Amino acid sequence: MNAVADLSLSYPGCSQDMTGGPVASRIYVKGLGTSSDRVRLLIEALTNHRDFEVFVDPSVGGAADSDFYHNAAAIVVVCGNLLNGDTSYSNNWVLYDLEYGSRPMIFAKIDPGVVLPDKLSKLSVFDLTGWTGGENSELAQLMNRLDYIVDHQLPYLFVQSLSPWVVKGAESAVDHIGELMTALRRLDVVLAEDDVQMQALGKTLRELGETYRVVKSVVEQFFAAGLNPDGIDGEAYARLERRRLAETIHNGRAHCLRIGARYYREGGIRQALESRADAEILAMADETFHELTISDHDMLAKMDLVGEGVTHESRAVVTLLMSGQETAARRRILQARDLLLPLEDKLDEAVARFMAIEASLGYAEDRAVEKEGVNVTIGTVNINGNNENCNIVVANLIKETELMVVAPGVPNDLREYLTNLEKAVAELTTRLPDEAAEYAASDLKELTKQATSDRPNKLLLARAADSLINMAKSVAEIGLPVIDLVTRVVELLN
């Protein structure tokens, strides 16, 4: 094993409880094919080193349960010769964690003649086969590696892994966006003399084009970090996994709320088409914009998953580097690259097609337009007897939320909190710009969807809750009820 190489990672140390993520000083020892007697010396050495909390798996005579395993800063896997020819290791968490890359793992062989299984055989392993206590150079390197991991503790991260179905889903979405853009391009002839609607159509097409570009940028950043001829750029991968790339894509891509508002609002694209387009064109436009308006939870959401997948792969690379497994990290990068290359090729083609469409519509932005934009029609939504003024997109989102709240099976205390939260968010949106109001209403809908689900997604629930609270903090006293009610809902579900 090589000495610890400083990756210059800027993670703060962390110490969290068992439900909140890894605890900085917690080391978990797990055995693969070895007995408790052979591991005892190593456990004693770990316990006496620094301020480590050492938890021992039942496989080597300990009593620690899975909670300690999942919340350890690092896993020390001790391999013995009982592992030779044994394939039962594939049913435990070691192989899963190695594949998922959720936390650093250090491997040590403790018996002479250990033969590691294929999936472990290419890893760097500390050799303690001749150690019987006292000082040992391999043990010193193992301790140095653990010191480094603890001093550069990775924060808790749970994201969707990069899998073939994630990439295939994104490829399918790229193709479908292209089909929808081609359909929108047909409206150019009908709207050619309407400067305002040509601007609105151009903005929609450009949002879809930016979806290509932002996903392409994320993929290219992952590739570029692995091209350093002097070795893997660990800091670059650390930056990628810290950035929450799904949010980078989400914020940079098209959004159905804006697209729907341009089409359905008073004086919007659809009203302009009603008096100019034939029935076939109008039906095509209705179908296309309807699909775009609901695409955040389907087609465009597939793009967000690419961001989560690249974040996951970046975390796995960082974890392997911290564990001293540079060769394994390089293999991981190449595997992800092979998986992502077809998507990158498809994005290159899609961007080229989009640029051709953009060039044909470019004149629309250059023409003088008296009004910079068209305000979304203010609608009135009735929420449990209270009329709240908000734009029509917000009104529809809050109405959809209300239907979830009144559905059978929602506990009374939860229903009361969510009903009051609807009113508070509706009031909040009247003090926000249109786009921010739409995001707040969308967050309310997502939070309510997860809160009323039989199997809520805690990650999506937390994101929606955090976003609503941050939005509420920007509006002084009006936001206080939102903060209070969101907190109550989350506490009730926990």
Image (cartoon, grey):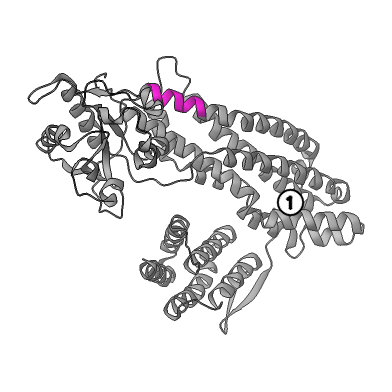
Which residue occupies 39% across, 37% down? 90
From the viewer's side, name the closer residue of 282 and 39: 39
Question: Residue 44 is drawn in which quadrant?
Answer: top left
Residue 425, percent across and down? Answer: 50, 70
Depicted 153 relative to depicted 2: above or below: below
Which residue occupies 86% across, 62% down? 274
Residue 427, percent across and down? Answer: 51, 73
Is 285 placed left or right of 55 in the picture? Answer: right
Question: Residue 104 is drawn in which quadrant?
Answer: top left
Is 341 placed left or right of 490 in the picture? Answer: right
Q: Residues within 10 Å of mark 1 (few under 14, many from 20)?
A: many
Residue 277 in sight here: no
Which residue occupies 10% across, 24% down? 132
Task: Tell me, yes or no, whether the highlighted magenta stretch contains residue 328.
Answer: yes
Task: Tell me, yes or no, whether the highlighted magenta stretch contains residue 24.
Answer: no
Region in magenta: 327-335
Task: Please name the residue that numbered disc 1 is placed on.
Answer: 200
Which residue occupies 81% across, 37% down? 360
Is 447 placed left or right of 44 in the picture? Answer: right
The extreme right residue here reads: 278
Residue type, numbered disc 1: Ala
Tell me the quadrant of the picture where the N terminus can be found.
top left
From the viewer's side, name the closer residue of 445 and 38: 38
From the viewer's side, name the closer residue of 368 and 294: 294
Depicted 465 relative to depicted 65: above or below: below
Residue 410, percent across and down? Answer: 49, 76
Residue 34, percent across and down? Answer: 23, 33
Depicted 117 relative to depicted 171: above or below: above
Q: Main secondary structure of the magenta part?
A: helix
